Image (cartoon, coloured by chain):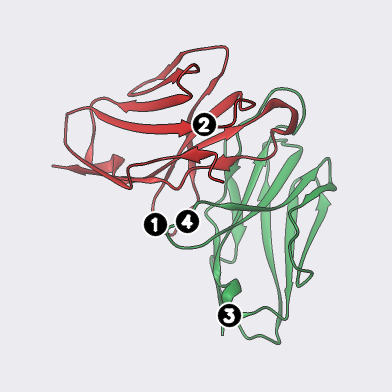
Chain colours: A green, B red
Amino acid sequence: DTEVTQTPKHLVMGMTNKKSLKCEQHMGHRAMYWYKQKAKKPPELMFVYSYEKLSINESVPSRFSPECPNSSLLNLHLHALQPEDSALYLCASSRGTSGISYEQYFGPGTRLTVT
Amino acid sequence: DQQVKQNSPSLSVQEGRISILNCDYTNSMFDYFLWYKKYPAEGPTFLISISSIKDKNEDGRFTVFLNKSAKHLSLHIVPSQPGDSAVYFCAASSGGSNYKLTFGKGTLLTVNP
């Protein structure tokens, strides 16, 4: 089983709203990631959690706030977003982040539109 | 500075023929390479990977070749099927910080029936 699930599939929010994206994996992976992908562009790394601790923040604005409640769950809290934040938000997981490289498995994404 | 390059934005092949997707990299610290397939409005799907200690890895219809001296890798799909039509991303990482995948811009493969 290499499934990463994400909810919701689509989200439309205003610039003053607060919303959250959710991601879940049951592969026993200890690393989880948030990516942002714009049309016709490759995924851009936002955050990395390793063993439930934030290990990488790729200089993401504070209006994006990640949270890892446990080893299977990853949330991305959104507040006061801008229209340019509209994109496909992808969650991924991998066995780990140290030692030899591990493949990252991606979820289907949440299509976010900020109005 | 684009460290992973996929110079062909698109490729069109006939069903049953071979598809060859190419990828070049500039960072000599990269030691692990991956290919992902992506359909519109879906997340990337992991296809196949290769470590720098190998020059070939095969999985069913998919084979990845790595030429370290040329800093070049390619993905061969044989035989190509219409369901293979998608965007293919090449990605690379370096062992010390393998959490970070550096992606190419992708190649749109169209397999015509």
Give me the C-alpha separation between circle 1 and circle 3: 21 Å
Number of residues whose C-alpha sits closer than 10 Å to that of mark 2, classed few (under 14), some (14–19) or many (20 or more):
many
Q: Look at discs 2 and 4 and give the one toward the viewer.
A: 4
Q: B72 or A104, which is in the foreground?
A: B72
The amino acid type of the residue labelled 3 equals Pro
Secondary structure type for disc 2 = strand
Q: Which residue is mark 3?
A: A83
Q: Quadrant of the C terminus of chain B?
A: top left
Q: Position of residue B8 (x, y in %)?
A: 32, 42
Mark 1 / mark 2, whichever is N-terminal:
2
Outermost residue toward the right?
A: A53
Q: Is residue A27 above or below residue A47?
A: above
The amino acid type of the residue labelled 4 equals Lys
Please report, as a chain letter, where disc 1 is located.
Answer: B
Numbered circles on residues, count: 4
Q: Which residue is mark 2?
A: B34
Mark 3 / mark 4, whichever is N-terminal:
4
Residues at circles 4 and 1 in contact by the CB criterion of under 8 Å:
no
Q: Which residue is mark 1?
A: B40
Q: Which residue is mark 4?
A: A41
Secondary structure type for disc 4 = loop
Left or right of B8: which side holds B38?
A: right
Q: Position of residue A115 (x, y in %)?
A: 56, 85
The amino acid type of the residue labelled 1 equals Pro
Number of residues whose C-alpha sits closer than 10 Å to that of mark 3, classed few (under 14), some (14–19) or many (20 or more):
some
